[in-house]
């Protein structure tokens, strides 16, 4: 006799499943109550008290463990932990690593596939303050590796296939089961619709005649008809009198009365003589006599002498010397020591990290601010660059930056970054 294999429990795996269920509950509260204002690096000053149900630590964990690596798909992380915890608790005798493998493959494939439709997730991206809907992992796989090698179309087909394959492996479903179910459903709807339509007109059933009522006990007996004999004498026809309706009396015609029109009465008013007003005579102004101008004789001008003192005044005041002014700093102190090439490289890498394709075309260094002109690639929205103001400031370790989008008269975007140390002008 062959002994039946007994189910062997794994207590360690069950304990790990309970821990995963607890982490599932904590991650659910952290992720679904996340607010970017709770993190000081994203919003200064941070919100006090925090909006997150697990406090500031919950907000940091939700951002740096779920949303920053996986983007919008980070909302699915609690459900993955729930699935793994239930399997390890209820079915500890089953190998779990294949299930975890397919869960991870499906999760990463979905995050990468979201990267190709960024306009669908604009609202969530702004709420979560992430650069791309697929996060860092989706950006790395969908844009920088597979997206460059086989283009977005080929990479999208691969990610969609891997996601469907992980669903089939986790559910144990046959690949053609969804199509067979859909085909059966279409056939059922078609046959049902065909049955409802009548092919021949339906005849109405004839009404059944009601049986005659039984005579009641109190009813009177039937009376036999009596025959009457009529005489042959002619019957006098009755005279028909037609009453004529009286005609209405004619309406009296209205009497026309000629009313004489009143003649207009002419009234003559007495003429009133207007008083004559004498205008006063205005005498013209007398011409002013010009004052005589005294012109000095040429002999008098020759005798005039002007004394001009050099550097002295009659009051004894002396001009200050130039030693009061500060000396001009050396040329080395007046030139900027900013490493513009290093900052340009960091700026280019930050833009590529958040999925913005652009090139730095011009750098202009000033005494306090350095301006970088950036030309975005075709199809890149300017709002996508302005939304990264805080992320660029964080990458360059600057207190604040200014983005001018666009620069007037140029098809470029200007980013002004303050210098580490100002120079004398």
Image: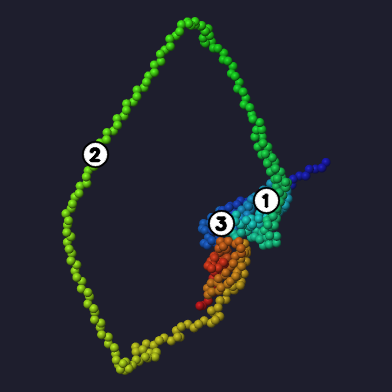
Q: Position of residue 400 (x, y in %)?
A: 53, 67
- Describe residue 402's horizontal placement relative to residue 161 as left or right: left
Q: Callout 1 environment at 10 Å: few (<14), some (14 to 19), or many (20+)?
A: many
Q: Which mark is residue 259?
A: 2
- Describe residue 128's horizontal placement relative to residue 301 as left or right: right
Q: Quadrant of the N terminus?
A: top right
Location of residue 391 (image quadrant): bottom right
Q: Position of residue 289 (x, y in %)?
A: 24, 81
Mark toward the viewer: 1 or 2: 2
- Residue 32 position (above or below residue 148): above
Residue shown at 68% from the left, 37% from the top = 191
| Circles 1 and 2 in contact, beta carbons < 8 Å | no
Residue shown at 25% from the left, 36% from the top = 257
Task: Pick whichever, 384 or 76, lies toward us.
Answer: 384
Task: Pick whichever, 204 or 413, lies toward us.
Answer: 204
Per the model, the C-alpha gap separating discs 2 and 3 is 93 Å
Q: Callout 2 environment at 10 Å: few (<14), some (14 to 19), or many (20+)?
A: few
Q: Which mark is residue 127?
A: 3
Q: Position of residue 398 (x, y in %)?
A: 55, 68
- Residue 329 position (above or below residue 125): below
| Circles 2 and 3 in contact, beta carbons < 8 Å | no
Location of residue 354 (image quadrant): bottom right
As helix, strand or loop, the secondary structure at mark 2 comes to loop
Residue shown at 39% from the left, 18% from the top = 242
Q: Earlier in the sequence, mark 2 or mark 3?
A: 3
Per the model, the C-alpha gap separating discs 1 and 2 is 115 Å
Location of residue 69 (image quadrant): bottom right
As helix, strand or loop, the secondary structure at mark 1 comes to helix
Which residue was labeled with disc 1? 84
| Circles 1 and 3 in contact, beta carbons < 8 Å | no
Per the model, the C-alpha gap separating discs 1 and 3 is 29 Å
């Amino acid at each position: 006799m062959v002994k039946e294999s007994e189910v062997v429990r794994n207590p360690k795996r069950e304990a790990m499943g309970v821990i995963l269920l607890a982490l599932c509950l904590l991650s659910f509260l952290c992720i679904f109550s996340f607010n970017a204002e709770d993190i000081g690096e994203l919003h200064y000053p941070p919100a006090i008290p925090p909006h997150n149900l697990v406090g500031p630590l919950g907000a940091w964990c939700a951002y740096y463990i779920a949303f920053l690596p996986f983007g919008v798909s980070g909302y699915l992380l609690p459900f993955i932990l729930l699935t793994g915890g239930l399997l390890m608790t209820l079915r500890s005798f089953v190998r779990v690593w294949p299930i975890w493998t397919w869960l991870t493959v499906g999760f990463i494939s979905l995050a990468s596939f979201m990267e190709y439709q960024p306009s669908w997730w604009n609202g969530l991206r702004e709420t979560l303050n992430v650069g791309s809907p697929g996060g860092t992992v989706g950006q790395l796989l969908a844009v920088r590796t597979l997206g460059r090698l086989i283009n977005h179309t080929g990479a999208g087909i691969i990610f969609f296939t891997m996601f469907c394959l992980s669903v089939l492996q986790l559910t144990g479903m046959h690949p053609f089961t969804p199509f067979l179910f859909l085909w059966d459903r279409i056939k059922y709807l078609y046959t049902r619709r065909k049955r409802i339509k009548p092919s021949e007109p339906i005849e109405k059933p004839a009404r059944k005649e009601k049986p005659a009522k039984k005579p009641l006990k109190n009813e009177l007996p039937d009376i036999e008809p009596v025959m009457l004999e009529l005489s042959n004498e002619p019957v006098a026809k009755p005279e028909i009198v037609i009453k004529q309706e009286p005609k209405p009396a004619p309406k009296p015609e209205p009497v026309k009365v000629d009313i004489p029109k009143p003649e207009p009465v002419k009234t003559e008013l007495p003429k009133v003589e207007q008083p004559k007003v004498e205008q006063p005579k205005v005498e013209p102004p007398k011409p002013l006599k010009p004052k005589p101008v005294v012109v000095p004789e040429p002999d008098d001008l020759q005798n005039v002498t002007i004394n001009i003192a050099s550097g002295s005044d009659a009051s004894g005041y002396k001009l200050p010397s130039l030693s009061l002014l500060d000396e001009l700093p050396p040329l080395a102190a007046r030139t900027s020591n900013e490493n513009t090439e290093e900052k340009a490289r960091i700026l280019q890498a930050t833009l590529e990290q958040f999925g913005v394709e652009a090139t730095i075309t011009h750098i202009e260094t000033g005494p306090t601010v350095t301006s970088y002109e950036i030309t975005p690639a075709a199809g890149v929205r300017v709002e996508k660059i302005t939304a990264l103001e805080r992320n660029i400031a964080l990458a360059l370790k600057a207190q604040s930056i200014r983005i001018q989008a666009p620069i007037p008269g140029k098809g470029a975007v200007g980013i002004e970054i303050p210098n580490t140390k100002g120079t004398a002008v």
